[in-house]
Image: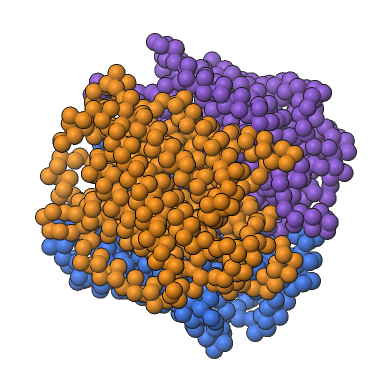
Chain colours: A blue, B orange, C purple
Amino acid sequence: MATSLNLCNIAMIILFGLFVRYDDESDAHWSEHKHKNNITSDIENDFYYRYPSFQDVHVMIFVGFGFLMTFLKRYSFGGVGFNFLIAAFGLQWALLMQGWFHSLDPNDGLIKIGIENIINADFCVAGCLIAYGALLGKVSPVQLMVLTLFGITLFAVEEYIILNVLHVRDAGGSMVIHTFGAYYGLTISWILYRPKLDHSKNLSGSVYHSDVFAMIGTLFLWMYWPSFNSAIADHGDGQHRAAINTYLALAASVLTTFAISSLSAKKGKLDMVHIQNATLAGGVAMGTAAEFMISPYGSLIVGFVCGIISTFGYLVITPFMEKYLKIQDTCGIHNLHAMPGVLGGVVGAITAATASESVYGHEGLVNTFDFEGNYAKRTPATQGGFQAAGLCVALAFGIVGGAIVGFILRLPCCWGDPSDENCFDDEVYWEVGLISFLFTYFQL
Amino acid sequence: MATSLNLCNIAMIILFGLFVRYDDESDAHWSEHKHKNNITSDIENDFYYRYPSFQDVHVMIFVGFGFLMTFLKRYSFGGVGFNFLIAAFGLQWALLMQGWFHSLDPNDGLIKIGIENIINADFCVAGCLIAYGALLGKVSPVQLMVLTLFGITLFAVEEYIILNVLHVRDAGGSMVIHTFGAYYGLTISWILYRPKLDHSKNLSGSVYHSDVFAMIGTLFLWMYWPSFNSAIADHGDGQHRAAINTYLALAASVLTTFAISSLSAKKGKLDMVHIQNATLAGGVAMGTAAEFMISPYGSLIVGFVCGIISTFGYLVITPFMEKYLKIQDTCGIHNLHAMPGVLGGVVGAITAATASESVYGHEGLVNTFDFEGNYAKRTPATQGGFQAAGLCVALAFGIVGGAIVGFILRLPCCWGDPSDENCFDDEVYWEVGLISFLFTYFQL
Amino acid sequence: MATSLNLCNIAMIILFGLFVRYDDESDAHWSEHKHKNNITSDIENDFYYRYPSFQDVHVMIFVGFGFLMTFLKRYSFGGVGFNFLIAAFGLQWALLMQGWFHSLDPNDGLIKIGIENIINADFCVAGCLIAYGALLGKVSPVQLMVLTLFGITLFAVEEYIILNVLHVRDAGGSMVIHTFGAYYGLTISWILYRPKLDHSKNLSGSVYHSDVFAMIGTLFLWMYWPSFNSAIADHGDGQHRAAINTYLALAASVLTTFAISSLSAKKGKLDMVHIQNATLAGGVAMGTAAEFMISPYGSLIVGFVCGIISTFGYLVITPFMEKYLKIQDTCGIHNLHAMPGVLGGVVGAITAATASESVYGHEGLVNTFDFEGNYAKRTPATQGGFQAAGLCVALAFGIVGGAIVGFILRLPCCWGDPSDENCFDDEVYWEVGLISFLFTYFQL
């Protein structure tokens, strides 16, 4: 593991040395750039439009995803720790991969990075962290590094096809991030199926305080999701509207999650697994449409429906998938990312297809869907079709990519993955103190 | 519970569909609005003035209040979970209620929402979460929903009277939020008095790690309070000054809290309950005066005094209230919100009454107190009087409203509230694992 | 303790009353200031450039440092609680001390404070919190107050010499904050050496959940470090570049920390102590150079090297220092702050010395290094020399200041510090419930 990490790091340094430089707004030539472009104030630097949202997204990636995965009684170190590792690795690789596709300066062949690139790198990483959710506790750190390396690469290609070739809008990534990431992870999990996983059954649950830790992750994801969906939306009304729509959809999801959870369980008791996860479904499902004029009640409807679907998924679909489809999904990413992601893509396509100048205004329509240049003549209806095509691309990349990477991870090789008895146990990869003995002994 | 939640949600969707639209700055017509009003840059969108503060406030509502209420050894799920539920419900209802009073577009009878509305919705919710603090562990989720429904409604009316009819300034809500919320909750708690609450005495304390969890709530409230008090203050110096004043008052409260806590307890030991709560009193008390020219040392004095009063409250007043006034106040909101809130109203009235052009400048005085239009001739002294009147309105709404809602919650009805033996126990509403047995058995 | 705290607080109120006022941008005269200086928009108020970064720094100080110190099994209250106390005290004193040196208005002899002052006060406090890291669990709150009082004073003088007299650039404080703070703490710890500290050996480790709590601190420090290094950098490209460089260096540190940790430990297992600390080394080391044109790959190299050095420090140097140099360093600040801080100073000096107009542009070079007024003729090479001199000043202040304060803290006096048997035990200063008995009994 150490060798591969150091090799990765040295490779990054060399590649960054060859390819990566500052962009106009982060370079010391900014003051000259200002004069040249008649920019009158430093506050027009894109940094001030996007940095607060970037920091919120950054918290979602490291604390949000990280702590959401601490819910297992004996895998909290692995949940938050390996999340930390692969996110820190992935963002470097993402800056390169996304840079080649999106930020290459044709004049000198160099990638020019600024605030938008580091937000996009965090987004790109999110796809791999979602995939990790399905595999939590069952794979080794080296396998996770491989998953991330390929995942980022696939992501960058998929994103290029969807956003640039098809000219699809997906500011919060319902398709690009969530659909892709979830099916990528589920396919890998399907290929790495462990028939005897119940040997580590006594470790696959939570304890009281590990559930409270997981709520830290849930809440930071929930609170900052408006920043996630608005971080790279258009300046002005685009970011503003994306934040409001996401805020509303998330609020609606919370209510339906509590409702369905109490309906279904024994004696009307609530289940922390639902609260920790399904409350977030509204944010996933608004990833595409958040910047559109979906209107406040539209956002509420999306959140309402997603909360129901997602909680229902935890109750019915996850056990079904494990039993009949042989897909073991530790965190239930099918319910939190796959279904709401697909739904988000569909909602986005419909909202785009029904857009009109009477609602957006002429200029607003052009700005929102970027109907400029080669796309000046595209109509909302056509755009809706392309949005739907984008969803298919994301699905295809997730499933095919996941199949390839899954087979690689099954190759006989020294991956260091845990035996069936040792799944969900930090003991395998971490130095854990005496108390571990008590935990295991009492099978808490 | 499920039925009522789904009904609420569907009602919200219908009402939002009928009444709520985007405002000028979040609508796709923003670019036309810019041209019309000679706005030269997207950065002038109110989003960029307030969004960072909004996110901080959002964290306070969900992580701050939520984790502050995890301190009980066996009610951490209920603390953070029900806080999540009622806040997510309340903010939807608040957008409607506050919208009707404050953001109704007279041209089309629709509510137009933007960033300021969602901050205000979070503020409105805060009032109900404060009330929840007094009732923590003793009421059912359905009761909490009713408390929130009425609480938000009362809040919106009270706020309209104070801010619009009386033209009182209260950017951080010492009166509107804290005084109202605290007396609302205390009155309800008084009506729902449980003489035999000591039957669940063994669950009404904390354990080591639940106290550490509560510190997460404390610190996020403490750190982001400058954003709370400055979030809807005037652009420019107003927000700037509100943040600095709050920062200072909070710092002073920490010192006096530690001082009084160590003075009073056995052998000079510190009590986590004080540190978790009384350190925040300075923020509450600066809610009205933060945007005024109270001057840095004035802020320190307010924080200093409040830290003393609040810690003293935990030591003396809470036990007294429980024994003689029959008010059971789980989180001690009387010490953290009621007393500092009233003090904050008084400080605000005095600071306003003593304002002068020599300190504020002519333009500064007009801007700070909004002495324009119908109020162009109001003097600072008169303003001070109205500020005091505002405090009385907040008190009246809290007590009368609390009495009404308290009686409703006592009606013989299937509220599902816990028996005296089961107070402060997550077991009643949540699926809790095996370890719960150990906890209860050893009475930790 | 109570008396000293109240005296401090009253002294602060008097001193603030005599000396501290709002600056132009937080005073109600801002609207007049705008007219006078042809400022067209409120968004040009420095508040909007720096407030989001301020809040991130604030979180680092209170949650970041605070929770990083909760890792001990029985000293979590002391870690987060005393951190809270001394930070809240220190920032008040820092506003005064730094104000006298940096923000004194020559016209009226008053300190004028705004957003930059409160960021700097938080920075100043960070130095003392670093020093606390070496002493965690071994000193009393009164000793910590004295350490802070002197530490802030020394910091302000040192900072004045480095930034103003030597005209050195150090936006993120590799030298001013980290080098100074670390050597200050280490020298004090050396003087307060406890030969029999192993009497409390059974409490000097972590338990499973205390390690998870510490990860909250680690992650908030890690995520917000880009804000730390960019908070007071130049508007525009300066802040933008500082954030990107720090982001990259931190990502690289994570990879090398995992690599070295797994290489070194038994059976390739990871050690939480390394992950909690050494992953942050890249942020420390970029404190000086972050705003320079160190280039993205330069940042990666710095992070790469620091991750190795810092992890290696935990493995080899800390035990060596404890055994042979008699320096007991509870949190390993030598590895996290001292070595990376010195390295950061050296990197800054080299980057400055090699700066050129071809890379920065003429205007960029002048802006970045502030080659204006008296310093208009300084060359990058000379600047590099002064940067190195600044590092020496920070070291000297840390060691000499630490020696003086260390001797003061050893004076026979009623400090209330714990006996060797009671180190690392919250029981001494906090009311801890029944469960403490179980902890101690089972020696968990």
Residue C426 % position (x, y) = 74, 45
User: From the viewer's perspective, is B179 left or right of A244?
Assistant: right
Q: Which quadrant of the structure image shows residue C50?
A: top left
Where is residue B169 shown, x and y percent of the image?
30, 38
Residue B388 visible to the viewer: yes
Q: Taking C363 as reference, is A203 left or right? A: right
Q: Position of residue B28 (x, y in %)?
A: 21, 56
Judge left or right: residue C94 versus residue C396. left
Q: Identify whether B277 is placed above or below B29.
A: above
Q: Residue at x 42, y 46 (%)?
A: B178
Relative depth, front residue between C391 and C298? C391
Report the residue at 55% width, 70% height from top: B418
Which residue corresponds to the image point at 25% horizontal and 70% vertical from the top-left? Answer: B14
Residue at the limit of the structure toward the bottom, as seen here = A324
- Residue B231 location, x and y as percent? 36, 43
Note whether B8 is above or below A5 in the view shown. Answer: below
> Where does the N terminus of chain A fall, quadrant-wise?
bottom right
User: Is any atom of residue A366 visible in this view?
Assistant: no
Quarter assignment of residue C179: top right
Q: Is residue A423 left or right of residue C283?
A: right
In the foreground, C281 or B328: B328
